Image: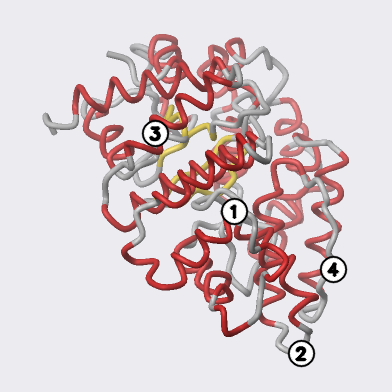
Amino acid sequence: MRLNKIHQDLKELYKGKEKLNTIVGVEFSHQEEAKLYTKILQVGQWYVAPFSFETYDSYAIKLSPNKKILESPVYLRSRWDHSLFSNNLANFLPMRQLKMLDTSDFVQYILDDWQLLEELSLPLRQYTNSLDSLEFLKEYLHNDDKLKYLENPSEFYTKIYLDFWNHYYDTPEQKKYVELMNLMIKDNSYLPEFEINNYGIWNTRACNAIGQRAYNLIDIETEKKENQFWHSFIQSHGFDPVEFDFGFIPYTTSSNFQLDTIISKFNPELSYFSKMKNHPLYEVGQILSKNKNTYDGDAHIKAAKAIDEELNDPLMAWDALVSAGYWGGVNFGQPNMNAWKAAIDLSEKHGWTEINEVLIDQLEFYNHYKDKI
């Protein structure tokens, strides 16, 4: 029984391949994979498509209604939360090598094993139609001008990280995101004026960073901060949380912890969100503010239905269902089955065929193994 099509395809492509974890840094199959993947679904994370894992972490594609599966971002998973890892599966391998460049010794290791890396990565590069995806990495490692960065990652890893992202995600959204983060990192008192911006796959992280900055600037009036809080709150929970002391490089922190600051603002005595009281997600914030540790996600399901049917915003409805799944997993260690089934219905209604297939496959996988591990 397959977990999802991507994982099954990669398993078949790499069947019998040796040294995969040593050279590429990940595995696509494991003798206990049924147990490993059932546990991921057991904590409610039906909203990602897991495909690979290493010793301590696993990687999954975020199911994104406005994108095809192979064009959707890849996330690094740690327990209940996910941090952005690469913009798609095609660029997963060079970004996996980038992760190792935070240690200077690994530069030579990569170069010494380059031929083997090319050979082992070929099936994935063919599968994703990205035969040239390692070229930038190769050129970077052989560029004498980059040597001072590579030899001193403790000082220059952020520079290396941005060089890779600016190449592999060369979009106006990436440039806008880098500009925003530069301003906020350089000036701890900087809070951008509220406006709806498109930061591409960085949207959630950007909104969360702005929300955290707004919370920590206590001398700014409520009405100038509540939009930033609101747009952080309506993102899909469990993805790209940030803490106050943030930088460019995502690290897995806790959405549960980060959202405390935003959720606390739903206390009616604080007079926040007066303009949002008629929005379906406002009631969710009210419920969470009373006791988020016993929240099961059901209010998000109710809100998702209203958002889809009354506001005609299926993408926001999807994010609400993802958040429902997140809270069920965090607080109870089990999937909110109503959220999962609502996501299947929503994906079918709006013709998100690939997502619908993954959701159904993973539900069948979960039902088959949940009582056997």
Mark 3 lies on residue: 340
Residue drawn 76% across and 90% down? Answer: 219
Taking 35 as reference, is 150 above or below it?
below
Instruction: Report helix, strand or loop for mark 4.
Output: loop
User: Which residue position is annotated with label 4?
Assistant: 192
- On residue 219, the disc is 2
Label 2 crowd bin: few (<14), some (14–19), many (20+), radius 10 Å: few
Q: Amino acid at mark 1?
A: Asp
Residue 73 falls in image quadrant: top right
Q: Secondary structure at mark 2?
A: loop
Q: Position of residue 295 (x, y in %)?
A: 36, 60
- Nearer the N terminus, badge 3 or badge 4? 4
Q: At x 43% / y 27%, what residue is drawn?
A: 51
Q: How many marks?
A: 4
Outermost left residue: 372
Q: Position of residue 270 (x, y in %)?
A: 61, 83
> What residue is shown with label 1?
102
